[in-house]
Amino acid sequence: MDTDSKIDLIKKGTLEVITEEELKEKIEKGNTTAYIGYEPSGRVHLGHAITVQKMIDLQKTGFKVKILLADLHAYLNGKGSLEEIRKISEYNIKCFKALGLSEDTEFILGSEFQRGQEHVNMVYELATLTTLTRAKRSMAQIIRESKEHKVAEVIYPLLQVVDMHVLNADVAVGGMEQRKIHMLARENLPKMGFTAPVCIHTPLLHGTDGSDKMSSSKNNFIAVDDEPEVIKEKIQKSFCPQGQVKDNPVIEIAEHFIFPRMETILIERPAKFGGNLELTHDELVKIYDKEELHPLDLKNAVSKHLIEVLEPVREYFKSN
RNA sequence: CCCGCCUUAGCUCAAUUUGGCAGAGCAUCGGACUGUAGAUCCGAGGGUUGCUGGUUCAAAUCCGGCAGGCGGGACCA
C-alpha cells in the first residue's frame, strides 16, 4: 500500500484528520503508534465499534495500536470504584478483541502508569498552562451529568493529554466528543517540549432513540455482543422517520457497519410494496430521501445484515 | 471553626406554614393509531421522603445527632 492509499483508508468514514500533512510525515517516517482510550463501560456498543474499526484500519496501514482502558478516567468521572471499573475493563478487552483487532494490539490499564511520579509531575505542569475554563469546556460532552462539579472533572483532560505523550502516540483517535481535549493536547504538549499527536475524529453515532449520542447509560445502544433477537428488537424500536436521511440512526448503522463490508445491501420487500431491491449506499440514500423506501423495509434489511456483521463477535464469545 | 438554607420516584419538583392515605410533569413500560420508530391519545408500574435517635394514637412535616450539597461569615503571621 502506498502512502496515499494508506491516507485514504485512514480518512475513510472520519470527520477530520488534524492534520493530513502531519499524518503523511508520520507514515513516511514509519514505526508509528496509534492510540485510543476508552472509559471501561458496562456494554461495548456500536459507538465504540466505529472507533475500533478505525484502529483496525490503522493496523492495516502499519500502525502499532495501543488501547488504553481508562479506568482512572472513569473513576475521575464518577463511574465507580477503581476495583469495579477494572473488572469491567476485562470484559471490554474481550469485546475489542472480538471486533477483530490483531494479535499484537497492546491493551494498557490506565491506573498502572498514570499515578507514577513522572506522570503526575507532567499533569501538574500542564495544569499551570491550562485555564480552568478551557479544561471545563473540553469536558462538556464527556462529563457525567451532575450539578456537583468535582475538581476531578478538570484533572481528567490533563491526564489524557499526558497519556498521549507517555504512550508515545503519533496518532490519537476518538469520537468528536474528544475533539476539545485533543486540541488542548495539540496546543500544550509542544509548550512542554513534546510532539503533539495527529488527531483523528470519527462521527458520533446517534442513539437508537434518535438522541445525539449512543451511550450505555441511556439504554439507546446496540451492544456488539447482543443476541440476534435483541438486535432485531432494538432496530425495530429505533427512531426512523420516513424520508429523513440526516441524523437517522438506522441509516447510520448501514453506513458505518454494512457498506464498508459490501457494495450493496439487499432489501427484501413484499411484492405488494414493490419487491426486492439491491442498493448501493448512494442509491439507498437517494431512494430513502424520496420516500420510496419504507422505514420498516429498511429496518428489516439493516437488522439482518447487522446481525451477520456482528456474528464473529458472538462466535468469539462462545469460544473464549 | 461559626451561622443560614437545602436533601422527597430515574430526573425536575409539589405536599412542611396548620402532623392525618406522599402527588405532578418529564422519563420508563404496555395498549390504540399509523405497513417502522417518533408525535398524539389511553393506561400501568415506579418510594427505606439522605441516615439515625426521639416526641406523638399518628411524622416528609416537630425536636436532637450525623452525612452530603449550596450560600455567607470568621481566620489570614
Image (tube, coloured by chain):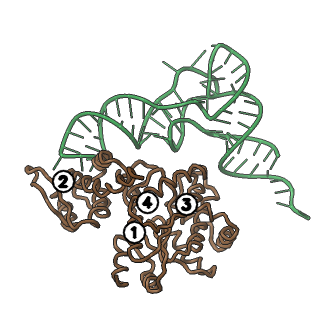
A102 and A36: which one is in front?
A102
For label 4, the SS is helix
Disc 1 element: helix
Badge 3 or badge 4: first in the primary sequence: 3
Q: Position of residue A79 (x, y in %)?
A: 56, 51
**Three-letter amino acid code of the residue under disc 2:** His
Q: What mark, if any, has residue A70 been given in the picture?
A: 3
- Relative to A158, is A270 above or below? above
Q: Chain of mark 1?
A: A
Mark 1 — residue? Answer: A56
Q: Earlier in the sequence, mark 3 or mark 1?
A: 1
Disc on res. A93: none
Give the residue at x 60% y 50%: A83
Question: Which residue is identified by label 4?
Answer: A96
Q: Is residue A237 above or below residue B44?
A: below
Give the chain coloured green. Answer: B
Give, as a three-letter code, the residue at label 1: Ile
- Asked if labels 1 and 3 touch by Cβ distance under 8 angstroms, the answer is no
- Looking at the rendered image, the disc whose residue lies closer to the viewer, 3 or 4, is 4
Q: Earlier in the sequence, mark 4 or mark 2?
A: 4
Separation of residues labelled 3 and 2 (CA atoms):
42 Å
